[in-house]
Image: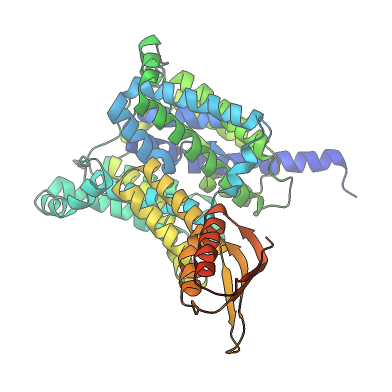
Amino acid sequence: MTSPLSSLRSALRTDFTSSLVVFLVAVPLCVGVAVASGVPAELGLITGIVGGLVTGLLPGSSLQVSGPAAGLTVLVFTAVQDYGLPALGVIVLASGLLQLTLGALRLGRLFRAISLSVVHGMLAGIGLVLIAGQIYALADHKAPGSGTANIAGLPGLAIDVLLSDPALIAVAIGAATIATMTLWKKLPGKAQLLPGPLVAVGAATLATAVFDLPIARVEVSGLAKAIQPPGGSDFAQLAEVGLLTTIIAFTLIASAESLFSAAAVDRLHDGPKTDYDKELMAQGAGNTVCGLLGALPMTAVIVRSAANVQAGARTMVSRVLHGVWLLVFAVLLPGALGLIPTAALAGVLIHAGFKLLPVKELGPLWREHRGEAVVLVITAGAILVTNMFEGVLIGLLLAVVKTAWETSHVHIDVGDTGAGAVRVSIRGHATFLRLPRILDTLEQLPADRPIELNLAGLRHLDHACMSALQHWADQHNAHTVQPERTRASA
């Protein structure tokens, strides 16, 4: 029989090795998300450190790992462009405080009620915008801005790349990074002890340094210089409606992504399941600290969390240690970041963007739940055409309308023997959405014969239908000798 002490030692050993795996996965992703967000690379590492040392110590989901996420890259980039880098701390701080409040009010579990098709559409939309923007970074070019502008500028980008040797080299490095990450998953299990992103970025960095390639590299300013706590003038921007809207978008999207990630991680292991309210508060605490440091917003990241579970992690020790390794790396080896080509990081994010697209799931979803597939595609397209916040709102509204339409089924049976009263039975849910069909059926009935209208099978009768049926009955009674009999029971 295994003693508790030996079990604890075994758990600590596996957590130690798991933390190293998660650290190696986190480094290129932290840096890549920061660069794509238009902020210093060190801010991505700071958020990863906070995710390990702050959020990692708090209860909620013991095996989930937090840090900067590719899913918020587009939103962060837009916010920095619109309000400036100093305002990012205010936005993240306010979002963290909102998450703490929502968790304290025990509203975390409500995020589980969001339509899955909207969530998948949101992730797909993020993936499309991310890919469209990072294609420019792949060629060491600056993206025009919005999703539609990025797509419209692709032909011009292709021409510029073909006419520029440095751009062609950058694209080759980025494409090689994507190819390495894609093929790495197909290698035997032992070869995958090293994470694909680390191998791909490491190889690209080595090739760039050895051949002294004329391509852009990550700009390094130092960890201390990158930290920019928000000041009084930055908080004054809270009076702007646009900034408040951005805060709400950050809060909702970061919370939803974290809690849906928690649900996915719970399916990967047999240990204690997530307490959604505590996990939301843990994310809020992490974002509050990130805001005070002027760093990137944080979410739970499914890539790192899955790597943590698959590496054998058993407790929260692994995710805390991964934060320690990030801190050691940022303090002792900051110059190593300046060797990394930005095209390689763009390749990492393009690969991450493709993984957000539900390519395999869309076909079966279309065959089995066509309405859900429509919501997913429209949500993704709306995010690409408008922005994250408006796209998600459109998706949520569409999901509500679809659900209301599907649940408002009504069945109308007409019995006519040719003599006496015509018997009409209405069953199900009589709502304004089905009112045109109900009235069309009733108006086609003989106007000179009595109608027996049976509403006993209705489970719901809203005010619009009730008023319309009463009005129809009054009009019909005015044209018939024998008044109709109506048995109404909702």
Query: Which residue lies most toward the top here?
Result: 232
Residue 28, picture quadrant: top left
Image point 69% across, 62% down: which residue? 489
**Farthest residue, direction bottom:** 418
Q: Residue at x 64, y 54 (%)?
A: 268
| Camera-nearest residue between 149 and 20 | 149
Query: Where residue 392 sits: x, y (%)?
Result: 42, 46
Residue 113, image x, y percentages: 59, 48
Q: Which residue of the protein is positioned furthest toward the left in this rendering?
A: 163
Query: Which is nearer the eye, 462 or 50?
Result: 462
Q: In this view, does 378 lie to the left or right of 416?
A: left
- Identify the colour scheme used: rainbow
Q: Can residue 245 be seen in this view?
A: yes
Q: In this view, does 93 lie to the left or right of 203?
A: right
- The vertical placement of 430 against 400, above or below, is below
Residue 385, given in percent of the width and then of the height, sits at 29, 49
Looking at the image, residue 69 sits to the left or right of residue 131; the answer is: right
Residue sitting at 46 percent across and 19 percent down? 293
Quadrant in which residue 295 is drawn: top left
The residue lying furthest to the front in this view is 481
Residue 81, relative to residue 366: is it above or below?
A: above
Task: Confirm whether residue 32 shows in the render.
Answer: no
In front: 358, or 478? 478
Query: Eyeballing the image, is 292 above or below 430?
Result: above
Which quadrant does the C terminus fall into?
bottom right
